[in-house]
């Protein structure tokens, strides 16, 4: 069992960095005849997996079989494993003899004895068979290599048979499948190294489909905002101002397109504005989702598309999905996904501990888009903990994400404190972030202040003084001049009054 867990963990580690195509999470079964499946598995150096349940053996429990299929369709990691390494068919009644051979082999592995199915099955044996289905037969080069079923992972002395109590649910859950399949795959690696080499050569990791950019799409929810627009070349702050102006003027389709572009492309176009987009612009989106139906439709579509990659995505993609769930008001999706990731019997145990910690931190810091400023001391303590986690982190996977979370939080907290008139606290937050996260956080701090509408003259100290041109410096200068002009105008009005 330990070997199975270890090799499953290795499999997860190998594939977790890959971008997975939508097809990898498509239908569970391949649409081939049995002979075509045998031929294709040999030609592609893939395993052939034949799935046995009540459709294959009439006296098996149909309710248990149906629940097992539904469970398998929901298990993203299982479906990815099958697509990457195998061809899988659902055996029908016409293949009952082959199905019984597979079920017989699975039972033999479980109980170390062989039932004579060909001479007739006794009632108690039928009950056992109904419990053990579904089973999977693993064929290598057309020959049955092994068969697996739920009983191999049941802790009960009766292998999860009827009457075993709380473990009965294992009969319908597919949590056992990845463990068992990957354990047999590891056996094949050791026993058939030539075949395994061919398998890896002919079946490289699945390549990602091109990401769908909704800003390039004009539909019933929004206009199109293409990358070729030249009004604001690489000037993200101007695009933010455009989006807000469109919303103020009631242009709900134009503003939806512009906000979509900011969400998808803004941080990539100008990383200094990334934290402000993820925190402050996201708050704009959440308000507009509640205000206009087309915003709700557009960002729900983006959430559903993002969800297709959830399971084996990058940490940044997971964070983006969390934010989409937050702005569309879908906290249940966040909670159920985290529960699936961290607590499910196989997915949670396969996930490296450092990734599990980061997922929890992402959910904690990304999901409350609209929350207002609490006690400044408490907010600073939260930021200090994030920075401390980053400084002490040893994992190369987790450290960059923790730095991003801390930077985003510092930008948000600085902007909120300026909004509340807490100048000294805002400056203390900025100093803390720059000293402990790096001087490159300074421009992000200033960008957040600009987006919040609270630039200050001392923000110049946070920008580079190497003489290189900077859009942020230009915008800061213009905003300060405008601020000074507005103040002078206000003073003149008061004098007149």
Image: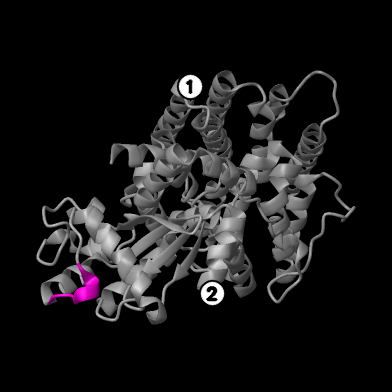
Residue at image position (79%, 61%) is: 225
Name the spot of residue 104 as percent of width and height, x first.
27, 64
Say which residue label 1 marks. Answer: 391
Residue extending furthest toward the front: 119
Which part of the image, by quadrant, shows the N terminus?
Answer: top left
Task: Residue 351: tell me if it is visible.
Answer: no
Name the residue furthest right: 230
Q: Does residue 190 appear in this view?
A: yes
Which residues lie in the magenta part? 116-122
Using residue 159 as the reference point, say whether residue 88 is left or right of it.
Answer: right
Mark 2 vs mark 1: which is more N-terminal? Answer: 2
Tell me if mark 2 has few (under 14), some (14-19) or many (20+) residues whose alpha carbon lies within 10 angstroms of its own. few
Vertical comparison of 303 with 281: above or below: below
Residue at image x 77%, y 69%?
Answer: 223
Residue 329 picture location, percent across and down: 48, 63
Dot 1: within a 10 Å radius of its alpha carbon, few (fewer than 14), some, or many (20 or more) residues?
Answer: some
Would residue 40 be counted in the magenta stretch? no
Q: Nearer the viewer, mark 2 or mark 1?
A: 2
Q: Secondary structure at mark 2?
A: loop
Decide whether residue 120 is among the magenta residues: yes
Question: Label for residue 33?
Answer: 2
Give the side of residue 442 with respect to residue 45, left or right. right
* Residue 384, picture quadrant: top left
């Amino acid at each position: 069992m330990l070997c199975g867990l270890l090799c499953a963990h290795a499999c997860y580690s190998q594939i977790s960095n890959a971008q997975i195509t939508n097809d990898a999470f498509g239908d569970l079964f391949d649409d081939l005849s049995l002979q075509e499946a045998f031929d294709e598995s040999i030609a592609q150096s893939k395993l052939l997996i034949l799935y046995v349940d009540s459709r294959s053996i009439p006296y098996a429990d149909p309710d248990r079989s149906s629940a097992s299929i539904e469970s398998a369709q929901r298990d993203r990691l299982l479906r990815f494993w099958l697509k990457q390494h195998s061809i899988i068919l659902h055996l029908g009644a016409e293949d009952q003899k082959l199905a019984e051979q597979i079920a017989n082999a699975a039972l033999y592995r479980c109980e170390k004895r062989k039932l004579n199915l060909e001479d007739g099955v006794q009632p108690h044996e039928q009950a056992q068979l109904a419990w053990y289905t579904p089973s999977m037969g693993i064929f290598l080069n057309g020959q049955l290599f092994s068969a697996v079923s739920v009983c191999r992972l049941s802790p009960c002395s009766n292998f999860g048979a009827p009457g075993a109590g709380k473990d009965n649910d294992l009969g319908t859950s597919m949590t056992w499948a990845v463990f068992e399949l990957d354990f047999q795959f590891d056996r094949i690696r050791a026993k058939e190294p030539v075949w395994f080499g061919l398998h890896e050569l002919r079946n490289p990791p699945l390549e990602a489909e091109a990401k769908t950019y909704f800003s390039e799409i004009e539909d019933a929810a929004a206009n199109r905002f293409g990358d070729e627009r030249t009004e604001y070349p690489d000037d993200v702050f101007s695009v933010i101002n455009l989006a807000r102006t469109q919303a103020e003027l009631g242009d709900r389709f134009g503003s939806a397109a512009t906000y979509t572009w900011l969400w998808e492309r803004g941080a990539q176009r100008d990383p200094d504005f990334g934290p402000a987009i993820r925190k402050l612009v996201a708050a704009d989106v959440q308000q507009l989702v509640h205000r206009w139906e087309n915003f709700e439709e557009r960002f729900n579509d983006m959430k559903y598309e993002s969800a297709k990659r959830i399971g084996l995505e990058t940490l940044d993609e997971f964070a983006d999905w969390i934010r989409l769930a937050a702005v569309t008001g879908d906290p249940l999706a966040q909670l159920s996904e985290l529960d699936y990731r961290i607590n499910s019997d196989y997915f949670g145990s396969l996930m490296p501990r450092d990734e599990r910690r980061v997922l929890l931190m992402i959910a904690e810091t990304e999901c409350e888009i609209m929350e207002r400023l609490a006690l400044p001391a408490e907010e600073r303590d939260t930021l200090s903990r994030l920075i401390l986690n980053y400084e002490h982190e040893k994992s190369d996977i987790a450290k960059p994400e923790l730095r991003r979370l801390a930077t985003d939080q510092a930008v948000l907290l600085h902007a909120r404190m300026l909004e509340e008139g807490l100048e000294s606290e805002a400056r203390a937050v900025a100093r803390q972030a720059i000293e402990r996260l790096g001087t490159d956080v300074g421009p992000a701090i200033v960008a957040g202040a600009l987006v919040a509408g609270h630039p200050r003259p001392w923000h110049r100290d946070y920008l580079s003084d190497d003489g290189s041109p900077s859009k942020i410096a230009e915008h800061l200068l213009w905003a300060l001049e405008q601020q000074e002009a507005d103040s002078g105008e206000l003073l003149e009005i008061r004098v007149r009054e």
